[in-house]
Amino acid sequence: MEETRGLNKNATRMLTGFIMGTIAMGCIILGGVALLILLAFVIYFASKEYVKILEHKGFYPSLKIILASEALLAIITYFDRTQYVALALTLCTFASFMWVLFRGRQPYIANVATTILGFVYCGYFPLHLQLLRDISSQQYHDGLGFVVMMFVAIMMTDIGCYYAGTRFGKHKLAPVVSPNKTIEGSIGGAVSAVIGACIIGLFINYFFVEIPWYIPILVGFICTVFAQIGDLCESLIKRDAGVKDSGNSLPGHGGFLDRSDSFIFTIPIMYYFCKYFVFSHDIVNYIKGLF
């Protein structure tokens, strides 16, 4: 896709990011069906890009199995029937084997493995956003504030990494996987993420509900760590397959997988952090019980 005429690369990237961010935040605030439609849209195109990348490598995961599995998992997460996730993953894994068994296309092991990875990586992980948005407890009405905190932390990670890396970057973070990323940039992204999360935490404290002072710091740290890991992991997949971008659907950003890579690992980690440490203290109480 050609860049928007009359805009340079940075302006195109900013415009695309603003439009995407506005739509995404609107769907997140609305929740429910709006958020499900957003997730379905992103997951569908990200899965297609994932399959295309793997085909460039010589592997042939089944897009049909991936999409069908993601649809099943989306229904489960939308209705918050997480007790059926293990059953769904078992059935989807079985379907992946059956597809390879009856289609009989080489390489068998790689095709099964990449199909399973596809619906977990592109579908199941991002679908935790629905669970995070709808989580609740006696203290917190829902998880909207923590979703916003996560999004801001990830956004600030990207900004901090870029500007700190550009100005101070000297030592390579992962030279084989992503030569342009530096340790200095990573530190700048981490500091920016914590600051961003703390600002949102102050906003939530002032206007909505009180949260412990250390929670935004932990959220910022968790988000920046797994956002950067997610970015590097997607770079690893692309480099191994010999492609630069996952697609060209989003001007200035590449593909949907390129734009969402920082969220893929962060979303499920944030959900489980909130579920077991913020909205309840199940794990903390269990650990205390051991002593």
Image: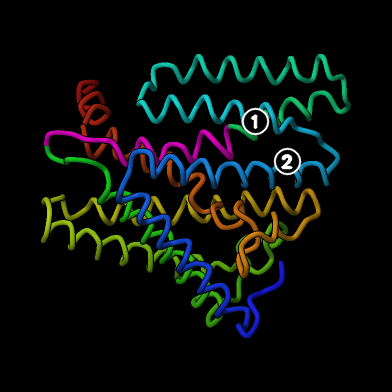
How many C-alpha atoms fall within 10 Å of the one at disc 1: few (<14), some, or many (≥20)? many
Q: Residue at x 21, y 23 (%)?
A: 291
* Mark 1 / mark 2, whichever is N-terminal: 2
Near-viewer residue (116 or 187): 116
- 161 vs 44: above or below: below
Instruction: State how the image is colored.
Output: rainbow
**What's drawn in magenta, residue-wise?**
120-138
Q: Residue at x 57, y 32 (%)?
A: 120
Q: Amino acid at mark 2?
A: Val
Image quadrant assignment for residue 25: bottom left
- Relative placement, left or right, of 102 versus 138 is right
Q: Residue at x 88, y 27 (%)?
A: 106
Q: Where residue 175 appears, x then y in whole percent?
A: 69, 62
- 187 vs 269: above or below: below
Q: Are marks 1 and 2 in contact (CB under 8 Å)?
A: yes
- 287 vs 182: above or below: above
Reading the image, the residue beneath label 1 is 66
